[in-house]
Image: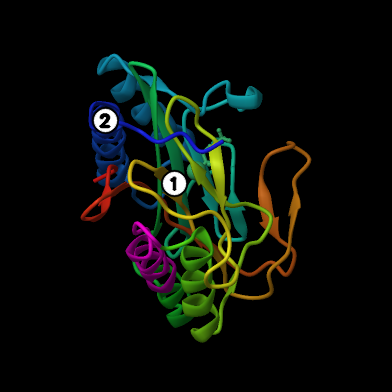
Amino acid sequence: MIDLKTREEVEKIRKSGRILCAAFDIVRSNIKTGIPIIELDRLFEEFVIKNRAVPGCKGYEEYPNALCISVNDEIVHGIPSGRKIMNGDVVSFDSCVLLDGWHSDSAFTVIVGQSESEMDTRLVEVTEKALFIGIEQARVGNRIGDISFSIQNYVEMNGFSVVREYSGHGIGRKLHEDPVVPNFGRKNTGPLIKEGMCIAIEPMVCEGKSGLYIEKDGWTAKTIDGLKAAHFEHTVYVSGNGPEILTI
Ligand code: MF3
Ligand code: CO
């Protein structure tokens, strides 16, 4: 069942999203070679709690931390540890915030310091652009498959592959609601997009072949071929006038 949100409800998700973005800004400004990633998780959590919100990932299906931090061949759901990030690492940050009963969800990827890999730079650019191309399709009258197709098509046109095991999703009172928003699919298929829908769109893109395995920690998803991956995500509201991003 797809729950359509009222304007008032959307404003609550937007407030939640603002805290998430501000917490991400703190993370961004602390990213530097040599910092243990657990320190970034701590700064994120501290900020969210100070703003009377709840770090929504922590405790979600027993996930242990506030932030998911995935480095290089880790695609998503990397668990923060004492690992220090190094120059040239491709690092994805994914998190959600719960405020006043409403969830927001967002992710971004950066390259630490100076990248020597043209492919890594392109990976990050193409993944972010794929997100915005997907968002552009989140319009009344389109179908979810239009979002999925446009993301897959753009990524594959650029020689990369999309992750198929994880998808975007509806979002609101629950972190994961209907509909499922895959990053691959066909035009004009899937649920009709209606005014009031709130969805998290989140392309996960691999430099090499699509395909993943889960680490022994039960969470970290890694590419099988060991090549790098990137992830961008926004929570989006479908208004009568087009998509509105709630996590900026
Ligand atoms: N963007 C992630 C998702 O939709 C946020 C949840 S992370 C988790 O799955 F660690 F809590 F699972
Ligand atoms: Co999500």
Residue drawn at the location 47% of the way across and 73% of the way down: 150
Residue drawn at the location 63% of the way across and 62% of the way down: 163
Stretch of the chain drawn in magenta: 125-141
> In the figure, 220 relative to 212: above or below?
above
Q: CA distance from mark 2 to mark 1?
A: 16 Å
Q: Secondary structure at mark 1?
A: strand
Residue at numbered disc 2? 19
- The dominant secondary structure in magenta is helix
Rendered location of residue 5, percent (x, y)? 35, 33
Residue 108, visible in the rendered structure: yes
Relative placement, left or right, of 81 versus 25 is right
Residue drawn at the location 29% of the way across and 46% of the way down: 28
Residue drawn at the location 53% of the way across and 73% of the way down: 187
> In the figure, 49 relative to 74: above or below?
above
Specify the label residue 200 is tagged with. Answer: 1
Relative placement, left or right, of 110 versus 89 is left
Quarter holding the N terminus?
Answer: top right
Q: Please tell me how many numbered marks the rendered image carries.
A: 2
Quadrant of residue 224 within the rendered picture: bottom right
